[in-house]
Structures are given as structure tokens and as C-alpha cells.
Amino acid sequence: MVAFIERLSFAAGVVAAILIAAAIVIVCQMVFIRYVLVESAAWQTEVVTFSLVAATLLGSPWVLRERGHVSVELVTAYSSPEARRVMLMMADTVVFIFAAIMFWKGLELTLQAYEGSWTTDSIYEFSLWIPYASMPIGFGLLALQSIACLIKVARGEDGSRRGGH
Amino acid sequence: MGPEIAGLLIGLTIFALLVIGVPVAFTLAITAILFLVLGKGLLAISTLAENFFGGLAEFTLLSIPMFIVMGAAVAASPAGKDLYEALDRWLNRVPGGLIISNIGACSIFAALSGSSPATCAAIGKMGIPEMRQRGYPDGLATGAIAAGGTLGILIPPSITMIVYGIATETSIGRLFLAGLLPGLMLTVLFMTWSLYTAWRSGYRFSKVASYTWGQRIEILPRVLPFLAIIAGVLWVLYGGVATPSEAAGVGAAGCVLLAVIIYRMWQPSKLWMVLSSSMKESVMILMIIACSALFSQMLSSFYITQTAAEAIAGAGLNKWVLMLAINVFLLVAGFFLPPVAVILMTAPILLPIVTQAGFDPYWFAVVFTINMEIGLITPPVGLNLYVINGIVPDVPLATILKGALPFMVCMVVGIILLCIFPGIATWLPNYLMGPAI
């Protein structure tokens, strides 16, 4: 179960990394069109902005798994193993609650956008439900991953928290 | 709930969540949701998903992953080694050239990579053993690298400055310019202190390696292209030719290409390492940004930001007393949290207070950042100290800390100089871009 969730998180993380790489390529293409060919390029701005949002949401579960979301580690690091375990389990529960709320809200919004055929304001009229869908997917996975983290902490195999930056 | 009580409760909630180890991003978001629901009812979070999405769907934010990829490509390549060697070969005749080239290499590499620990690792790996071998005291050799590594968050292009710009809606190009001279000032302060300490401890700068001009010129083609990319990115930004995201995107592609061409870093595993580590750091920062957007919306719906700014303005505090209090607060926050997190949590609240007291927002960005730099070399979080401890495990952490202490004093001196001569930060952006509106 835990291993399966972590594999899902990893897969989403790979997609997130690919989205960032794609964004770099698209930005370069846009710069080339705008400043070398001196033509207008507008769809790229929307596409890369949305891929950035999706990358953040899809990458988040993996970053949680690696304990890469920055947190204050001072107190947990100097607490007794038992107190530390309780605190980390509470922390993972908080993450789960947040992810679950956002999953539900994100799903609601995505369905609304899909049923109402909402589009962006630009002339390209991209369907909004596609970028919105990264919220239920990303936060859904984040909720699952927070449960996986919780289980690992409860089993006493959480390892050490890694600091970010 | 009045703004004062709400503010207090919010502060306590955040403290409690951070203490048990909830990541900063989720702490901010869950606090925002909790207080919106408690104070305004469930209806207040009906647009939660739109607000979250809106906080992230900004083209400017794209500059963050782009600059991170740019730095990660440089950090993963042996560019640090070459940069160090280049400076050593060119500066070997200068008295104390070795420590000067170490600090110089730190500041350039820190600017290139944008990462403080990566700089300590890259330059420290060569520099510290070399300095110790040539007789520099352990504390000085390690402290100088620890401090030198922190310069990256001040010298452009700096991710920390971009995040400040996004959090406070100030111009990123202007912030970069504001950080340049103070960054050089700190570099010079660090160098001066190092030379003085080395001299005082009896080191006489006699044992220099010698290099031929051929050796000096031979190394340049491996170093200059990276510097050219940085210069190009900055030039494009200040010329107003392109937006930060565009400049950073091309810079990122450029640095990856250079790493592939110069250092033959074409193996998929290496490129994947650059990409995946960049993804993780970007996600970490962007998640905090999105969540802090929810948080600041909540704060302003309770009129907390406005009330705090008015209360402090109304208290009739001397503006320098206020600035001192803010500095102490930032310093303490920087002891526990990385710069980006501190900025996103506090800058939106502090900036109205600071500007109302008559300080320049760009000047404040520089003072803020130097405070954060100090946090990078102080325990308990001071990541640089641990990175250096990992490179030279035989030097005790206490020696590194003692060696880094004078450099913290240098940074405080830097802040004082900035208070006396604010032009160090504001002159360059005003001269090149015209006065801020």
C-alpha cells in the first residue's frame, strides 16, 4: 500500500519535472519568435503558466515523501523519539486535512469548469478544466502520500527529516 | 473577532503548527482556511480553489524554476572547480591571493548557482584543503567559505530577491540591481577581515604557487561562457528587453547547453539529477508562494495587515528603533527558517510598516536579505556550517562556527553601513532605471 502510493508520487514527480523541462523549451521558442522573428507569440505564456501550476501540484507529493517541504525541525529533532513520533504524526494529519479540503474544492471547480465549458479569456480559449484538473490530481495524491508518511512514521521508519534549500 | 485578537490567535496557531513540524506552506494554508471558516463562515472558502490557482498562475513565477534550473546546471557541473582554479591562477601574486580568490570564487559561484550550500560544497571542497595546506588557520579557512557562500542570495540573479519581489510586488530587475553593490561591499568586507586575521595570526603570504600566462589563459574558455550568460541575463533584464521569466528561461537553456558542451554532461542520469533537484526546490518554493497568497488574503480580510501597520505608525516610534526591532525579529526568524520561507511569511506584513516609516522598499530588501544571510551561518539551521562540516569532518563544528562569527559581524557592519549610506543599495537602480515610483 505504502509502496504503491510512493510509486504514484514518484510518477507524478517525473511528470512535474518533464513539465518544467517543457516550459524551458517553450519559453526559448517564444523568445525566438518574439525577439528574433519579431512576431507575436501569446499562447506560450498561457501554456507555460499552466504547466508551472501543474508541475507544482503534481510534484508536491514526491517532495512530501522526500520531506523536502521546508519545516521547522528544531523541536522535533531535539525531542524524545516518542514525542517526535507523535508530533510528526500530528503534522502529517494536518497535511492530510489540508490536502483533502483542497482535493474536494479543486474537484468541485474542475467539474464546474468542465460542465460549463469554461475557457481562458485569451483568443485561444483554452479549456480551463484541464489546468484545473491538476488540483484534484495533485492534492489527491498529496492526501494519499500524507497517509503513507503517517503510516511510515507510526511504524517508526520515517528516517530523518531532510531540510530544504 | 477584532483584528488584534485574530492576529494573536493566528500567530499562536502558526507557532504551534510549525513546532510540531508541519511544513511552512501547509501551515500557512491550513491557518488561512481555519480562520476564514471560524471568522467568516464556510462561504468564505467557496472560492478557495480559484484563489489557490490564481496565486500560482502567474507568468512571473516561472522565473523561479528557470533560475533554479540555471543554477542547478552550474552546480552539478565542475564549473566551481574551474572558477576556483581560474581565480587562483590569476590572483596568485596578490598578497593573500588564495583567500581572496576563495571568497571571490564563492561570490561569483554563489551568484551563478543561486544556492548557498551548493557554493560551500563546490568551492569549499577545493578551497578549504588548499588553504589549510598553505597554512591558513582552520577557523578562517572554513568560516570564509561559509560566509562567502551566503552572498548568492544577495548578488543577482538571486532567487531570494525574486521571491521578495513577488511577495511585495516590487520590480525584480530593480531588486537585482539593488543587491549588486551591497553584495560587492560584503565581499570586500569579508576579504578585508580575512586578510587582517591571516596577517594577525602570523601568516605571511609567502608560499605562493606560480603559474604561467599560458595556464592562466588556458582556463578562461571554461569559465567565461557561464559569466557571459549571467551578464547577458542581467543585461536583457535591465534593458527592459525581456521579462524576468523570459530571460531566466533562455539563461537556463544556455547553462544546461554549456554544461553539456564544456563539461560533456550529456548523460541522461546527470541531466535528470539537475532537473529533478530543480523540480523539488521549485515545488517547495512555489507551494509556499501559493499558500502564502491564501494566507495574506485571510490576513487582509481580517484587516490585520492594515491594523498592524497603523498601530505601529501611530505608536510614534523612532524609525530607527523600529528598524532595529525588525532586524532583530528577522535575524531570529532566520535562525529557524530558510530565507524564502521567512520572506513569504513576513514581507507582506512588514513592507507596509517599513514604507510607512519612510524606508525605501528596495533598500529594505537588501537589509532583509543580509539578515537572512546571517541565518545561513548560524545554528541551529545554518545549513552552510553543516555542509562544510561534511567536507572537512576533522574540523570541529565549533571551530567552523567560531571562524564564521567575525563574518557575521561583517554583515552587521554591512547593515549599519547601509543605514548610514542607503545609496549603496538605491543609487545603482535609481541611476540605471530612474527613481522608483
Image (tube, coloured by chain):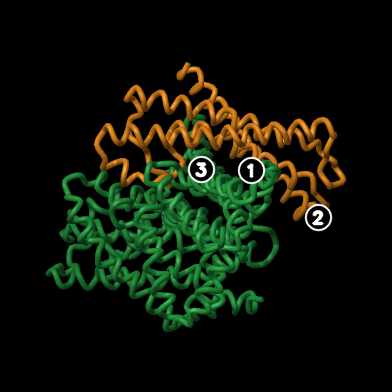
Chain colours: A orange, B green
If the image is split into quadrants, where does the N terminus of chain B sit? bottom right
Quarter location, residue A143: top right
Percent across and percent down for residue A66 are: 43, 33
Q: Judge if badges 1 and 3 mark residues of a common chain.
A: no
Question: Going 79% across and 44% down the picture, which residue do you hit?
Answer: A43
Percent across and percent down for residue B43 are: 69, 44
Tell me the mark number nearer the camera, choosing from 1 and 3.
Answer: 3
Question: Going 63% across and 58% down the picture, which residue do you hit?
Answer: B301
Q: Disc 2 to disc 3, how far (Cα)? A: 43 Å
Closer to the camera in the image, B313 or A137 = B313
State the residue position of label 2.
A38
Residue A27 in sight here:
no
Q: Which element carries disc 2, helix, strand or loop?
A: loop
Quarter location, residue A112: top right
Percent across and percent down for residue B189 are: 33, 72
Could you say which disc has been placed on residue A92 in the image?
none
Kind of residue at disc 3: Phe
Question: Going 39% across and 79% down the picture, which residue do you hit?
Answer: B417
Disc 1 sits on a residue from what chain? Answer: A
Disc 1 vs disc 2: Cβ atoms closer than 8 Å? no
State the residue position of label 1.
A24
Disc 1 vs disc 3: Cβ atoms closer than 8 Å? no
Q: Which element carries disc 3, helix, strand or loop?
A: helix
Kind of residue at disc 1: Ile
Lateral position of residue A80 relative to residue B218, left or right: left
Q: Disc 1 to disc 2, how far (Cα)? A: 20 Å
Question: Going 35% across and 72% down the picture, which residue do you hit?
Answer: B188
Could you say which disc has been placed on residue B26 in the image?
3
Lateral position of residue B227 relative to residue A131, left or right: left
